[in-house]
Structure formats: C-alpha cells, structure tokens
C-alpha cells in the first residue's frame, strides 16, 4: 500500500489518540503502568496492513510512550480463520499469537522480577 496524505493523516490521528489513552490511563491510576503496543492492522488477504496505523503504533513505541508488542500483521495464511481468508486468528494462529506476545512480554517481566 502506498503512503498517501490520507494514510499519513490517519496515522497521525491514531498516534495522538494512542498517546492520549495511554497517558490518561497512567494519570487515572497515579502510576506509570507499562503499555505494550502490537502492530495489528490486518484485515484480509490483499489488505494485510495499514501503513498509517502501523506508523502510529511504531511511533508510540519509538518515542518511549509504550513498549513494542509483536507484529501480528505477520501472522497470515494458516494463522487466520476461514482457510486463511479471515481477519480473526485460527486455532494455530491463536497459539502463534500467544507465543509472539510471550516473546515480547516475558523478557520485560524477567527484567523486573529478576528472572524468577
């Protein structure tokens, strides 16, 4: 997908919105709770990702507002329902999705809990 003014604009809005939600949640809780943000824009085959939204998801991580979660857009084919044509994960896709999250969250937890 080619980056256009519309996708760039939607990415900017999404980035600002994510920042607002994350900061508001931290303010409401009175502490700097961690947020992990996945790259998750997959719709269906032929529309596997949104450049603007992915840019927004990357920006909040790059800027230190959130931590990087997995790239779930990469989970296509057999990882999707409907014989690979669906937006939702299949059984094997759910397993791979959980593994991808563990790859991101477990090291962060180990760091904070001293590897226990």
Image (spheres, grey):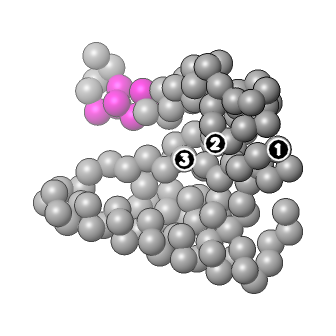
Task: Give the mark nearer the N terminus: 2 vs 1.
Answer: 1
User: Looking at the rendering, in which quadrant would you find the C terminus?
Assistant: top left
Tell me: residue 76, above or below residue 9: above
Circles 3, 2 touching at the beta carbon (< 8 Å): yes
| Magenta span includes 42 | no
Q: Residue at x 26, y 51 (%)?
A: 33
**For residue 107: magenta?**
yes
Q: Which residue is mark 1?
A: 45
Compare marks 3 and 1 and give the one earlier in the sequence: 3
Task: Decide: few, some or many residues near mark 1? Use Cα within 10 Å; few <14, some 14-19, many ≥20.
Answer: some
Q: 80 or 95: which is nearer to us?
A: 80
Q: Residue at x 73, y 54 (%)?
A: 49
Q: Is residue 67 left or right of 23 when viewed as pictured?
A: right
Residue 71's label in the rendered image is 2
Residue underneath mark 3: 38
Residue 17, by quadrant, is: bottom left
> Is residue 94 visible to the viewer in this orientation of the structure?
yes
- Of labels 3 and 2, earlier in sequence is 3
Label 2 or label 1, whichever lies nearer to me, is 1
Q: Which residues are magenta?
A: 106-112
Q: Which residue corresponds to the image point at 70% horizontal and 30% vertical from the top-left?
A: 81
Q: CA distance from mark 3 to mark 2?
A: 6 Å
What is the magenta segment's predominant secondary structure? Answer: helix
Residue 75 vs residue 19, the one in the foreground? 75
Q: Is residue 57 left or right of residue 116?
A: right
**Tag 3: Cα neighbours inside 10 Å, few (<14), some, or many (≥20)?**
many
Spatial CA distance of label 2 from label 1 is 16 Å
Q: Which type of secondary structure does the marked residue at label 3 adopt?
A: strand
* Image coordinates for residue 19, horizontal then vertical, percent: 41, 68
| Residue 36 higher or lower than 78, as above or below | below
């Amino acid at each position: 997908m080619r980056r256009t003014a519309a996708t760039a604009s939607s990415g900017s809005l999404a980035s600002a919105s994510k920042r607002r939600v994350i900061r508001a949640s931290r303010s409401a809780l009175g502490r700097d709770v961690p947020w992990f943000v996945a790259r998750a824009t997959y719709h269906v085959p032929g529309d596997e990702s949104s450049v603007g939204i992915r840019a927004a998801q990357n920006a909040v991580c790059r800027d230190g507002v959130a931590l990087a979660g997995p790239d779930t857009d990469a989970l296509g084919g057999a990882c999707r329902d409907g014989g690979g044509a669906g937006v939702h994960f299949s059984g094997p896709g759910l397993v791979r999705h959980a593994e991808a999250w563990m790859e991101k969250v477990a090291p962060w937890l180990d760091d904070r809990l001293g590897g226990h």
